[in-house]
Amino acid sequence: MESYSVAQVESITGISGHKLRIWERRYKFLKPKRTPTNIRFYTADDLKLLINVGILTRHGNRISKIGSLSSKEISEKVIELLTDTDTDFEDDISSLMLSAINFDENLFNNIFQRQLVRSGFLATITDLIYPFLNRVGVMWTASRIIPSQEHFITNLVRQKIISSIDSLQQPAHDAPEILLFLFEGEDHELPLLIASFIIKDLGWKVYYLGQNIPLNDIVTIIKKRNIPTVMSMITAPQIDKVSNLIYDLISNTDVHLILSGSKKNIPNFENLETVSVVNNPKELISQLHNLSNR
């Protein structure tokens, strides 16, 4: 049976542990299980219910009224709300979480398309998909979604991004150039695809190599095409190896390297002016503007 701690439920739903405990005491709809040592935990059904409750409370529904409803009635009210109301990003992220848990491609497509019409693809990626994938990462790291759920949702996102990249205009002849790749040992390509869309949308010419690329291949194409800027993502816990690869890359080329990914896995390069670290899409956009204006 899938189970979630209070901290994990907080991370996924945004509902505080304090509020969860109050609801447990006052209302019948929430009855978490307990371990032999009396520690609360929540089932997958509890998580789905709490995601829906969070959506309803954000739209002004009183918890006392929600507490009198069955799980089916709560779900029906959420469907009605999401159909008839202009939702915010938090509602849409919650709905995407449900689509991942339930393998619900239609729900994913409906939320994605609605946000696409409302804000355009770039805002959909930076403001909706990026924080959503962070929450999926919380569940993945905690082993609270099975591999098939993670693959299901990331492949849906991958399809959307690749399709949108293909629809972008070709860059100008004199557009700034950048090489995107993942070092050997790095296999999580989706964030790099998001970066590829963002960069190409800004008018840059992108050379996309993908995942698990040997250093010699990276250096070869940099020198062959005289590429001034490169970008990579660091997610795997291999700091010593990554540090050596980066120093080798910098010493053998004249590139400016942009890094992103898990902070705990990125070595400290504050002493290197040719290395920049960005933490989110908006910082990436700012960094690219700075580089293109040099």
Image: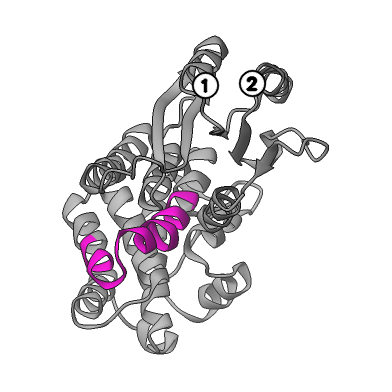
Rendered position, 243 above or below 170: above
Image coordinates for residue 81, horizontal then vertical, percent: 25, 80
**Residue 189 left/right relative to 18:** left
Mark 2 and mark 1: span between their CA atoms? 8 Å
Q: Marks 2 and 1: CB-CB under 8 Å?
A: yes
Rendered position, 32 above or below 164: below
Q: Specify the farthest residue to the front.
A: 174
The mark nearer the N terminus, 2 or 1, is 1
- Quadrant in the rendering for residue 238: top right
Would you call the spot at circle 1 few (<14 residues within 10 Å), some (14-19), or many (20 or more)? many
**Residue 100 left/right relative to 258:** left
Image coordinates for residue 17, horizontal then vertical, percent: 61, 67
Per the image, the residue denoted by label 2 is 253
**Which residue is at 47% across, 64% downward?**
13
Q: Specify the farthest residue to the right.
A: 271
Per the image, the residue denoted by label 1 is 222
Rendered position, 51 above or below 134: below
The region drawn magenta spans: 113-134
Q: Nearer the viewer, residue 245 or 22?
A: 245
SS at badge 1: helix
**Which residue is at 24% across, 55% downward?**
108
Image coordinates for residue 104, horizontal then vertical, percent: 21, 51
Residue 117 magenta-drawn? yes
**Residue 67 is at least partly visible in this image:** no
- Quadrant in the rendering for residue 219: top right
Q: Specify the farthest residue to the left.
A: 106
> The N terminus is located in which quarter?
top left
Would you call the spot at circle 2 few (<14 residues within 10 Å), some (14-19), or many (20 or more)? some
Characterize the magenta stretch by its predominant secondary structure: helix
Rendered position, 137 above or below 116: above
Q: Amino acid at mark 2?
A: Thr
Q: Amino acid at mark 1?
A: Ile
